[in-house]
Image (tube, rainbow, N blue to C red):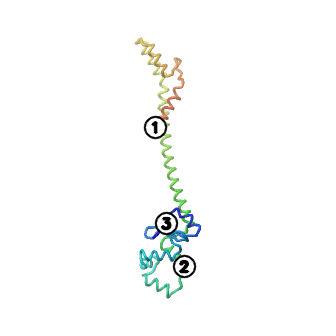
């Protein structure tokens, strides 16, 4: 059997074709120029691969003899009747409807991906918030640490080294922080991004 390829969907829609979604687990197209030209070409290929007996049972007959007897001696069967039976028996759907179904599945997939990204972003925001609180705590403690450091250095007679050390942190001696908060926020942000 010729399996249907999604890339042929647009061409199948132009000729008002049909997709049989379950021909022994495969998708098969019936439409001029794609897959099988008509229902008779499909039936011929199906008979060659799976046999008339299997086809008869799929479309609701007891066996192949019952099917051919009904077709030849009973109510006349035309191409449209056969197409209806085939579509009903093999989960057939017209190509235009298949496009809508395909878009729906694709949309559901994209929404799931968006939700995953939103969750990941939420985790990053939470990590950034925690990092911000941690940095704010450290920055708030710097004047106290500086004062304690300077007091300790005065008692040890290493005041010059303490002054030099304090300048490295860009802190003036009135207890004002110059640019340190913004610089540390930026460093923390880069650190969090490199870890995720």
Q: Earlier in the sequence, mark 2 or mark 3?
A: 3
At x 46%, y 19%, the residue is 165
Quick one: 117 or 78, which is closer to the camera? 78
- Check disc 2: other Cα within 10 Å, few if <14, some if 14-19, many if 20+: few
Q: Residue furthest bottom?
A: 73
Residue denoted by label 1: 194
Q: Earlier in the sequence, mark 2 or mark 1?
A: 2
Measured Cα–Cα span from mark 2 to mark 1: 65 Å
Which secondary structure, mark 1? Answer: helix
Q: Are marks 2 and 1 in contact (CB under 8 Å)?
A: no
Residue denoted by label 3: 4
Q: What quarter of the picture does the C terminus occupy? A: top left
Measured Cα–Cα span from mark 2 to mark 3: 21 Å
Q: Earlier in the sequence, mark 3 or mark 1?
A: 3
Which secondary structure, mark 3? Answer: loop
At x 47%, y 28%, the residue is 138
Q: Position of residue 52 (x, y in %)?
A: 43, 79
Q: Position of residue 134 (x, y in %)?
A: 47, 32
Quick one: 133 or 37, which is closer to the camera? 37
Q: Residue furthest top?
A: 157
- Check disc 3: other Cα within 10 Å, few if <14, some if 14-19, many if 20+: many
> Does 171 appear above or below 86?
above
Residue denoted by label 2: 79
At x 54%, y 21%, the residue is 176
Q: Residue furthest right?
A: 14
């Amino acid at each position: 059997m010729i399996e249907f390829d999604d890339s042929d969907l647009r061409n199948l829609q132009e000729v008002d074709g049909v997709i049989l979604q379950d021909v022994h687990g495969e998708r098969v197209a019936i439409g001029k120029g794609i897959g099988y030209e008509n229902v008779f070409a499909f039936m011929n290929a199906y008979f060659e691969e799976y046999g008339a007996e299997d086809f008869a049972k799929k479309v609701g007959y007891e066996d192949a003899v019952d099917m051919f007897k009904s077709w030849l001696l009973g109510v006349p069967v035309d191409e449209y009747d056969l197409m209806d039976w085939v579509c009903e028996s093999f989960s057939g759907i017209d190509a235009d409807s298949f496009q809508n179904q395909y878009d729906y599945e694709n949309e559901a997939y994209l929404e799931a991906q968006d939700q995953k990204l939103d969750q990941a972003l939420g985790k990053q925001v939470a990590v950034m918030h925690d990092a911000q609180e941690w940095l704010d705590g450290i920055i708030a403690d710097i004047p106290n640490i500086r004062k304690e450091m300077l007091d300790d250095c005065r008692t040890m007679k290493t005041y010059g080294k303490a002054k030099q050390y304090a300048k490295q942190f860009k802190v003036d001696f009135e207890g004002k922080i110059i640019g340190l908060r913004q610089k540390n926020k930026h460093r923390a942000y880069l650190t969090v991004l490199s870890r995720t």
